[in-house]
Image (tube, helix red, strand yellow):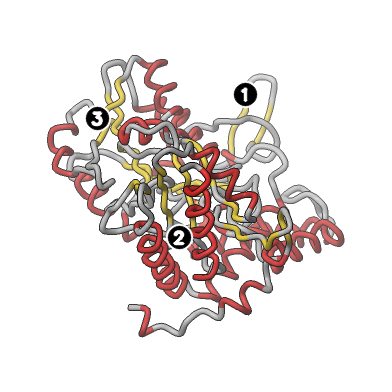
Amino acid sequence: MSTLLQPLDVVAIRQDFPLLSSVLHGKPVIYLDSAVSGQMPLPVIERMSHYERFEHTNVHRGVSTLSQEATDHYEAAREKVRKFLGAKSSKEIVWTRGTTEAINLVAQTFGRMHVQAGDEILLSAMEHHANIVPWQMLAQEKGATIKVIPMTDDGELILDALDELVTSRTKLVGVVHVSNVLGTVNPVKEIIARAHAKGIPVLVDGAQSVPHLAVDVQDLDADFFVFSGHKLSGPTGIGVLYGKLAHLEAMPPWHGGGSMIRNVTWEKTTYMGAPAKFEAGTPPIAAAIGLGVAIDYLNALGLDRIAAYEHELLVYATEQLSALPGLRILGTAREKASVISFVVEGIHPHDLGSLLDGEGVVVRAGHHCAQPVMTHFNVPATTRASFAYFNTRDEVDALVSGVARAMELFK
């Protein structure tokens, strides 16, 4: 596939990321932690700075030129997200603080409307805590039950279990598109189709998929799709809830305040339609504009080219790490994004992460907000390296060398 695509100019791309030319503990920074938070390129940083310096005001409520222009930029960013996800209407794009808030919004509105005592919510075995805890809270409140789609030791969901797990009491399926621990790319289109065949809506956690894969929510037929800006080379504090308009219009507001109302009296308040009724108060204007620029940046590079390049890095890193004795990679699914979680015999992941940090190699060590996954593999934590379009084979080599040196120290 990659041979048919114009390759990325990674040397030029790296110039857009100031961190990559900095030093950590006397060593060049090697950032292999994009799964937790992607680096922002200069065009994003500069556009947000320009807004804060020369355009800063509020949106949707002013007659001044500045306010109208800020509103235009803010809503233009929403339209960029709409196109990026392939949604029908910008009314289906709700700004949130991130994936976590987006899932909580759905749980506390759509979930409360539909889940009752004795009902069931079906989640996958590889969910992030953000797509577990809100549903557990709702289930406890309503007297409902959480059921789990199991997975294999390769880190692939056992879809044949759906026929038994989905019952007349199932009210929603929640599934991660790409596992933040295993890198598994789940067949969400098939899961959605099988759930819809039984009339069950599906929420897709796309936090780890949108930086790596082209997403079309209409093609997937997802009822809800959520992601965070900071995973997508954008700023923190901004995220997106996509919802089919029929769902959003039927759902009640979650937060109350300014901007989401039509009329307020002491007797009654009437609300705006979607998405405004879910966006009370002053929104993250600069962050939304920045996310729009991040989408422009990735679109200019080409998600197909990004995916091809990152896959090459994944294959190379997997080969090199697998050659180290005593190292075990968790998650060997046939379809993976550029994430590798691993454990090394005799070395705690936190110790390994600290040793790599001393070499300037930034990775993640811990349970990655996915403790049920750790339990499945019978480990307390893993070391995780995640690769982006600005990483290089030399940086993979530095990771592997750092792990090898740690193994020598712990002999």
* Marked residue nearer the N-terminal end (3 or 2): 2
Mark 3 sits on what residue? 170
Mark 1 vs mark 2: give the one in front: 2
Q: Marks 1 and 2, how far apart in space?
A: 36 Å
Q: Residues within 10 Å of mark 3 (few under 14, many from 20)?
A: many
Residue 411, visible in the rendered structure: yes
Mark 1 vs mark 3: give the one in front: 3
Q: Is residue 69 left or right of residue 54?
A: left
The numbered disc on residue 268 is: 1
On the image, the x and y values in percent for residue 80 come to 56, 64
> In the image, what residue type sits under mark 3?
Thr
On the image, the x and y values in percent for residue 138 come to 42, 22
For mark 2, give the secondary structure.
helix
Q: Is residue 292 left or right of residue 175?
A: right
> Is residue 217 placed above or below 312 in the rendered structure?
above
Q: Marks 3 and 2, how far apart in space?
A: 27 Å
**Foreground pick, 156 / 112:** 156
> In the image, what residue type sits under mark 2?
Leu
**Which quadrant is home to the N terminus?**
bottom left
Labels 3 & 2 near each other (Cβ < 8 A): no
The numbered disc on residue 85 is: 2
Q: Residues within 10 Å of mark 2 (few under 14, many from 20)?
A: some
Give residue 254's quadrant in the image. Answer: top right
